[in-house]
Image: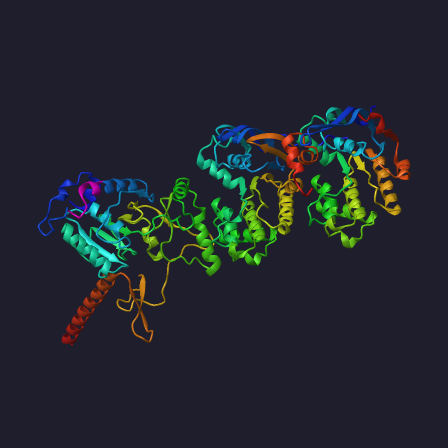
Amino acid sequence: MSSARLVVNNLQKDFILHTQNSAHIPVFNGFSLSVNAGECAVLLGPSGMGKSTFLKCLYGNYKITSGSISLYFEEGDIDIATCSPEWIHGLRRQTIGYVSQFLRVIPRVAAIDLVSEPLLIQGIDKDTAYQQAATLLARLHIPEKLWALSPTTFSGGEQQRINIARGFIADYPVLLLDEPTASLDAKNRAVVVELIHEAKAKGAAIVGIFHDEDVRDKVADNVIDLLEFVA
Amino acid sequence: MKMPVVETQPLLTVNNVQKLYAINRGCQDVNFSLYPGEVLGIVGESGSGKSTLLNCLSGQAAPNSGDIIYHTRAGEDLNIYDINEAKRRLLMRSEFGIVKQHPRDGLRMRVSAGANIGERLMAVGDRHYGHIRDVASNWLEQVEIDAERVDHLPSEFSGGMQQRLQIARVLATHPRLVLMDEPTGGLDVSVQAKILDLIRTLVADLNLSVIMVTHDLAVARLLCHRLIVMQKSRVVESGLTDQILDDPQHAYTQLLVSSVLTP
Amino acid sequence: MNSMDSMNSMDNTESANVSHAQQSNYNFAYLDEQSKRTIRRGLLKAVAIPGHQVPFAGREMPMPYGWGTGGVQLTASILGEKDVLKVIDQGSDDTTNAVSIRRFFERTAAVKTTTATEEATVIQTRHRIPEQSLSNDQILIFQVPIPDPLRFIEPSETETQKMHALEEYGVMHVKLYEDIAHYGHIATTYAYPALVNERYVMDPSPIPKFDNPKLHMNEALLLFGAGREKRLYAVPPYTKVKSLDFDDHPFEIQQWEENCALCGSDNSFLDEVIVDDEGTRMYVCSDSHYCSQRVAEQEQEQVSSSHSQNKSEDLA
């Protein structure tokens, strides 16, 4: 347990829809999980089971109903469930990377700017950030002529690769991957697997959702079936 | 792994601010802190108290009770309504910037673009024409207006350009806190993106802190780090922008979010 | 009692004594004593706060606004029986406005009038300061159309008052900036704003900027009256008055390549006069007394020099 980076304890998530007769929708309950540095935990379960909801809870995107999500630092631990928005901001800037299924960006902003943004936010100089962004975009087979364009007009697969690049560029110690390979071809899936292995080698604690069994088998150290915790 | 470095000195602290015109009209029980580099959105329907709150924050309307404490460049904590008016107006000119919804309210329409940007510089004591003009031209380029147009009147500009000019005018004196009232409200959707991108870039480059009133949740999502949701003069929910929009907790916020047509 | 004394004494009832030449139906200098007293009270405040606009209870005068009703009320308030009055309009003693106002006070106050600058104790002026230096026993009264220099950019009176109170004068430079941007130099040539006593920005009335340097450390008391706006302000003797400018575009006064066609002066403010249908023009001093005085002196010299020439011829 000494190298545990992320510990989820007894997590419960319900939705209450006030606009629809206060419908109460429980998602999961009593969910616990521990991920060590350099380890990749993969969530299993059919669609609609709450896998993405769980990742969003870890990212502070969804509020949890009860339980705790602890991150262990050299200086101490932080509970995402109770820390202030400023802290979640700090964690997103420095600690937690998140590759979502959808790309949501300001139209007009160039792909290379989007990809280098996480480094710039960390205070890394523009040249270095652009250099790294370019390397990553090239690895993910985004044609160079697209780099200066806004990804809003890109295909689904291209948009997903921009998201992947944003998630992997900053070497976050904790990575959340929501079906990063869903709309990728074999060539790019292989790149993502490589990236995950590299991140693990650098000590990242990864929680992911992969529908593709082949990818899952290549990266998973630990497979958790969410079905057991469905509320 | 190392803990992230998080700013602990707020730029602005709002404690129990109340400014009511009638029962539940205006704003009350407002509490929040704004940290350097943060963009805070205030959302809510018309009449929810957003603008009243912004007026209190911008020194234009003293609250009935409560404190608004600003941490100055010099490291002083000032309650902005405890200082005298001269000092408060100076603070508004030097450390605060206010961007109005309609550019014509924030610009002097009868003087040139250069003079509009230069006015704030002259107001804080710049008396060198050449320098003022250089700064004005630079700012025009930063907001993507051709520097050749420095002598043109704002009335010769399109709505989007006028708004960008207003932003340049406000930022020319390097304010630390910028208050914006629906900055894209009066603009065509086609020019909104450019303004949004501009604001986003400037906020990052200049490490600005921004408080923005908007009723456009899409704008809030793209620009704001944090949101405050107001209804009937009170803050009903606050938190990270994506958390508020993706997992709203309060009934009113859920209604607000579910009423939007576009994501 | 002359005007300097009456400024010092709030109780001026003696001056109400009707002199013989005065038209008996009017109080001395037209206004009633209470009205004059309130204006003098305002003037004392204005002198105490150089450049600050003081509101006053302006009266209807028997002339339209724009004809110098502000200046006339000030003159009426400070005029004493022993005062000698000079009235000029754009430097000239003999234009309609000057003649009318001079006659007004001749008839209502029966004071002595003059065209000689040095003889006058009170000079009412529209849009000029005499070329000749004034002394510390003289008062110069300006007619002012729009007293607030901030008005051109800020229409709200409460806002301009606040701006004056808080010394927020940045906008004053906006106009000068626009001048340089459009013309390459500061093109404002009259009513050129100036900072009085390092505190208040003042509109010096529509005098040419040529006259602005004369405001600085002037020995005479300078009073300004705006009748329509009901504001008065003052620059006391020996007060600093600095014309606004930019570090890289310093304040400059007008200059002419020509000299005065009549007196040959090369350092006075010149008016351009078209003399025929061909467009022939000449430049003459705007200050008519100054010009005629110089012409008279030159004739004197010529006479005396021709005398001495005759003498030397006689000797030969």
Corner quadrant of residue A215: top right
Q: Quadrant of the N terminus of chain B?
A: top right
Q: Residue furthest front?
A: A21
Is B131 left, or right, of C50 in this rendering? right
Q: Residue at x 43, y 52 (%)?
A: C245
Res. C246 visible in picture: no
Is A100 left, or right, of C277 in this rendering? right
Please name whichever residue, B54 or C242, is drawn nearer the observer in this view of the structure. B54
Q: Residue at x 88, y 30 (%)?
A: A222
Q: Residue at x 76, y 25 (%)?
A: A12
Colour mode of the rendering: rainbow
Please provide percent x and percent y for residue A195: 84, 41
Q: Residue furthest left?
A: C20
Please name whichever residue, A71 or C289, is drawn nearer the observer in this view of the structure. A71
Corner quadrant of residue C256: bottom left
Res. C287 visible in picture: yes
Range shown magenta: C28-37
Please provide percent x and percent y for residue C204: 33, 51
Please name whichever residue, C316 or B216, is drawn nearer the observer in this view of the structure. B216
Please name whichever residue, B15 or A184, is drawn nearer the observer in this view of the structure. A184
Please provide percent x and percent y for residue C54: 31, 42
Please provide percent x and percent y for residue C121: 20, 50
Relative vertical location of residue A209 with respect to residue B137 in this rendering, above or below? above
